Image: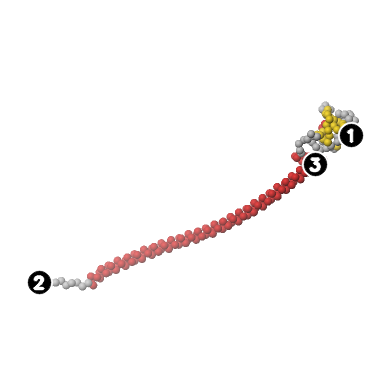
Amino acid sequence: MKHLYSALMLLIVLVAPRAMAENYISDELFTYMHSGPGTQYRIIGSVDAGDKITVLSRDRDAGYTQVVDSRGRKGWVKSDYVTTQPGLKERLPALEAELKRVKSALASAQDDAKAQQKGLVESLAKRNEQISKLEAHSSELNKKLIEAQSEIRALRAKIDTQKDDLLMRWFTYGGMVAGGGLLFGLVLPHLIPRKKRRRDGWA
């Protein structure tokens, strides 16, 4: 019971409205009402905790306040028991309503957070899927690039080989032509008959 009372008092401190003009008996079990400002005066009754009262006057020296309670009785109670804060029995419904509103707001905030988290998870999954596709595409492009580079190197090697073959052919053809010309130059004089020299009579 003490823990419940402490929890209720904490809630009151956190969410209690501003002090109103009305006066109340503070949250003790009850307080005695005397016919005068002091314990030496006759007790004319008791006022329950949280009852609304009307303050008539105060005796600061005696520490008592003259009040009229909710049943119309007029008397004096200890000033320590007079407060401007409504009692728990009046504030409790408002506190319960406030607590319900806070719980509802908290549940709504949790639902919103869950929805946002779900949206983030879905968005992250889509992003991861897109990244995976891009990585696969990039890997495929890299593979094709490597194949193309290998093919280019092979073609360049083939071109270099063809150049060497062509140069060798030209050298061969040139050698053959030169050899043929030389051979023709050596054979041709033997093929053409020489003219006989005429003998002059002066010899």
Please state if 173 lies on the left or on the right of 104 as rendered.
Answer: left
Specify the amino acid type for callout 2: Gly
Residue found at x 83% / y 28% = 59
Question: Which of the 4 quarters of the picture holds residue 128?
Answer: bottom right
Q: Amino acid at mark 1?
A: Gly
* Number of residue marks: 3
Tell me the residue at 14%/72% (across/down). 198
Quadrant where the C terminus sits is bottom left
Q: Which residue is mark 3?
A: 92
Q: Which residue is mark 2?
A: 201
Q: In the rendered structure, which disc, 1 or 3, sits on the residue that comes first in sequence? A: 1
- The alpha-carbon separation of the residues under discs 3 and 2 comes to 170 Å
Upstream in the sequence, badge 1 or badge 2? Answer: 1
Crowding at mark 3 (Cα within 10 Å: few <14, some 14-19, many 20+) = some
Label 2 sits on a secondary structure element that is: loop
Q: Earlier in the sequence, mark 3 or mark 2?
A: 3
The residue that appears at 74% across and 44% down in the rendered structure is 102
Foreground residue among 191 and 8? 8
> Would you name the residue on which mark 1 appears?
45
Q: Real-space Cα distance between discs 1 and 2?
A: 195 Å
Coloring scheme used: secondary structure
Vertical placement of residue 128 versus 81, above or below? below
Residue found at the far top of this picture: 61
What residue appears at the point 21 percent right and 73 percent down from the top-left corner? 193
Whether residue 30 appears in this view of the structure is: no
Q: Quadrant of residue 50?
A: top right
Residue 39 sits in which quadrant?
Answer: top right
Question: SS for tag 1?
Answer: strand
